[in-house]
Image: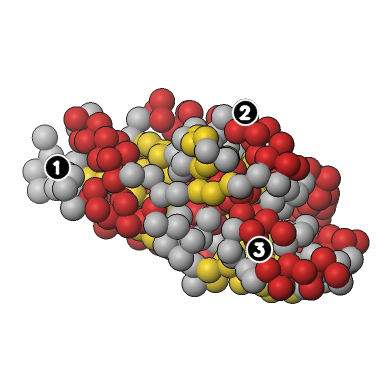
Amino acid sequence: MTLGREPRTRVAVVTDSAAGLAPCVTKEWIQTGGFACISLPLMIGDQIYTDSDDPGVQERLVVATAEGRRMTTSRPSPGAFTSVYESLATQGYEHIVSVHLSAELSGTVDSARSSARQASVPVSVIDSRSAAMGQGFAVAAARDAARAGAAPAEVEKAALHACDIAHMLFYVPNLDALAKSGRIPKSLAVVGQMFQIRPIATIAEGKLKYLERPRQEAAAIKRMVELVLDEAERTIAEDTRISGLPSGRAVVAIQDFYGRPLAELLSERVRTRFGEAAQVMRSTVPPVLAVHAGLGPVCAVSVPSSLVPGLSPTGR
């Protein structure tokens, strides 16, 4: 025993399926221990689904969209969080950092906080103010810090820093689904269809915000490519500053929900432009977000590699 050293607090990390982590990543982290992911329920017609990583749910969403069926999402119950928190506590984890979908988009954070107040170990609930891999990178940063033996406050700090630095770009091929879910006025969707608007959005202060509204698909795709490359370049420069190394690297997550052509184009352009300086990760836009965005959305998020060493092939 080393005198004078504070005993390490075992910290676990919890998130929800809106993060859109690749199923293989989620499975590996769960098996490694100290991690859990809570599914956000979604409803298609009168049927509720809780396993949003199930490929069958994705297929049902496509059919339901084509048929014009009602689709909604809801927050997990406080009981779902209680079960996960207590399971981690019984495994010997003494503190839990729970990172979730923006409170402006879902009541998930409220459910987490309700359960946290009753948990047998301290739980720090973090509103990522984001979604998809904007949230996912915060989760990855928290997990890396926890596995490195960081104190709870440092694990929280790592998550919050990633939340601040990750910038999401979100391409929406049409506005119909957003209008049906109440995210935008129906009148705006009508105008969008009339003028063939293909918006590019982000999440700012926890809310969906439109950056640009290109008209025609070709113009929107061209602009999305430009913005993603600009963001990756900015992120590489930021990693150079953070790491203190001669050259930085970025991790670029590109997600889609049946928008593969654009997602593959973005991946190819990033790799061609930056080579080994940018690691591209591909995964699916979470079904709980696709319910509101419809078919074809593509999301791109970049973070400095130094913030998420566990996702970097070099482990730097």
Nearer the N terminus, badge 2 or badge 1?
2
**Crowd around label 3: few <14 · some 14–19 · many ≥20 (10 Å):** some
The image quadrant of residue 226 is bottom right
Task: From the image, state whether disc 1 or disc 3 is nearer to you.
Answer: 3
Nearer the N terminus, badge 1 or badge 3?
1
Q: Nearer the viewer, residue 259 or 169?
A: 259
Picture disc at residue 56: 2
In the image, 23: left or right of 65? left
Going 60% across and 33% down the picture, which residue do you hit? 57
x and y percentages locating residue 231 in the rendered image: 68, 65
Nearer the N terminus, badge 2 or badge 3?
2
User: Which residue does the numbered mark 3 point to in the structure image?
Assistant: 179
Give the secondary structure at mark 1. Answer: loop
Q: How much space separates mark 1 and mark 3, taking CA atoms?
A: 42 Å
Q: Amino acid at mark 3?
A: Ala
Q: Amino acid at mark 1?
A: Ser
Going 81% across and 50% down the picture, which residue do you hit? 262
Check the picture and name the quadrant holding the N terminus: top left
Picture disc at residue 120: 1
x and y percentages locating residue 17 in the rendered image: 49, 43
Going 40% across and 39% down the picture, which residue do you hit? 38
Task: From the image, state whether disc 2 or disc 1 is nearer to you.
Answer: 2
- In the displayed orientation, state which residue is furthest to the left: 3
| Color style of the picture | secondary structure
